[in-house]
């Protein structure tokens, strides 16, 4: 029995090998092509990152430095049209955030350039361009992302796009719900805005969420006053 079993296994092995050879004969070219494509894609991506993205990122960082310095100063001392123009369009010896966002697309610096451009356009009253650039921005730094969403909300509100504005105030409040300061502040803004545009149900829900989730926040102390105006006394 033992010998028969071994013979059987040997026959099965030969059959398996034959099937494998037959499979390889039929599909070797597609397999090679697919395998090569994967290798090329992975290798190409690594090369792209090391040979193109890294140097591009470094060049972009150098390029944005003057605009970033002017922008940082404006956040402390106030936004002026001349300074905004320099940040957006550049000046002697440097290019502005708009060109950086376009020329260095795909880099982290271009992402930052979109944030800077959006903020500048917002302060300059160009709300449509503010929205366009801020929507191109994304960050894992939750407070920065929260601020970006709030600026999109403000710009939409200025354009009387009330539904979009309310949506982005809510987004700003929900980026990091563990951040009591930012979340409470923008829940309050969202609730007040909903009340202002006549969306009483949304306003009540938002005020109640603020009171329930962030009872120790400074905004929570004012919630009952607003709820009373909306006819909610409990």
Image: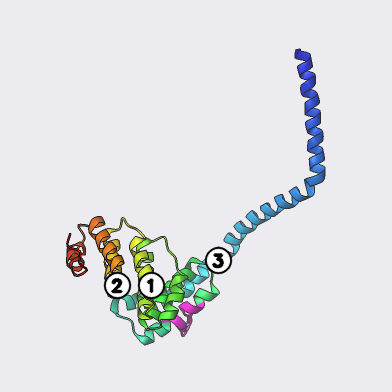
| Left or right of 85 in this view: 19 | right
2 or 3: mark nearer the eye: 2
Q: Which mark is residue 193?
A: 2
Label 2 element class: helix
Q: Earlier in the sequence, mark 3 or mark 1?
A: 3
Between label 3 and label 1, give the one nearer the viewer: 1
Residue plotted at (78% across, 21% down): 8
Is 56 above or below relative to 5? Answer: below
The part of the chain drawn in magenta is 87-99
Q: Which residue is mark 1?
A: 163
Q: Is residue 108 above or below residue 127?
A: above
The image position of residue 158, as x and y in percent, is: 35, 80
Residue 128: name its quadrant. Answer: bottom left
**Is residue 103 placed above or below 173 in the rendered structure?**
below
Query: CB atoms at circles 2 and 3 under 8 Å apart?
Result: no
The residue lying toward the viewer, choosing from 195 and 142, is 195
Cα–Cα span, label 2 and label 1 = 10 Å
Residue at image mark 3: 55
- Who comes first in sequence, dot 2 or dot 1? 1
């Amino acid at each position: 029995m033992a010998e028969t079993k071994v013979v059987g296994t040997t026959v099965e092995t030969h059959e398996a090998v034959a099937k494998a050879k037959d499979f390889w004969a039929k599909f070797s070219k597609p397999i090679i092509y697919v395998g090569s494509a994967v290798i090329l894609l992975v290798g190409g991506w690594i090369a792209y990152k090391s040979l193109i993205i890294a140097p591009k990122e470094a060049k972009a960082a150098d390029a944005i430095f003057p605009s970033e310095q002017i922008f940082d100063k404006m956040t402390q001392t106030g936004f002026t049209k001349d300074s905004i123009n320099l940040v957006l369009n550049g000046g002697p010896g440097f290019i502005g955030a708009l060109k950086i966002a376009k020329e260095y697309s795909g880099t982290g610096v271009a992402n930052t350039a979109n944030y800077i451009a959006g903020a500048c356009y917002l302060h300059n009253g160009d709300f449509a361009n503010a929205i366009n650039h801020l929507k191109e921005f994304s960050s894992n730094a939750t407070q920065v992302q929260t601020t970006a969403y709030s600026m999109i909300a403000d710009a939409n509100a200025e354009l009387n796009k009330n539904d979009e504005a309310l949506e982005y105030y809510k987004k700003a409040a929900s980026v990091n719900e563990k951040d009591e300061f930012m979340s409470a502040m923008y829940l309050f803004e969202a609730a007040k805005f909903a009340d202002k545009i006549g969306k009483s149900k949304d306003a009540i829900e938002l005020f109640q969420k603020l009171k329930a989730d962030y009872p120790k926040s400074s905004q929570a102390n004012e919630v009952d006053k607003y709820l009373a105006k909306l006819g909610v006394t409990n």
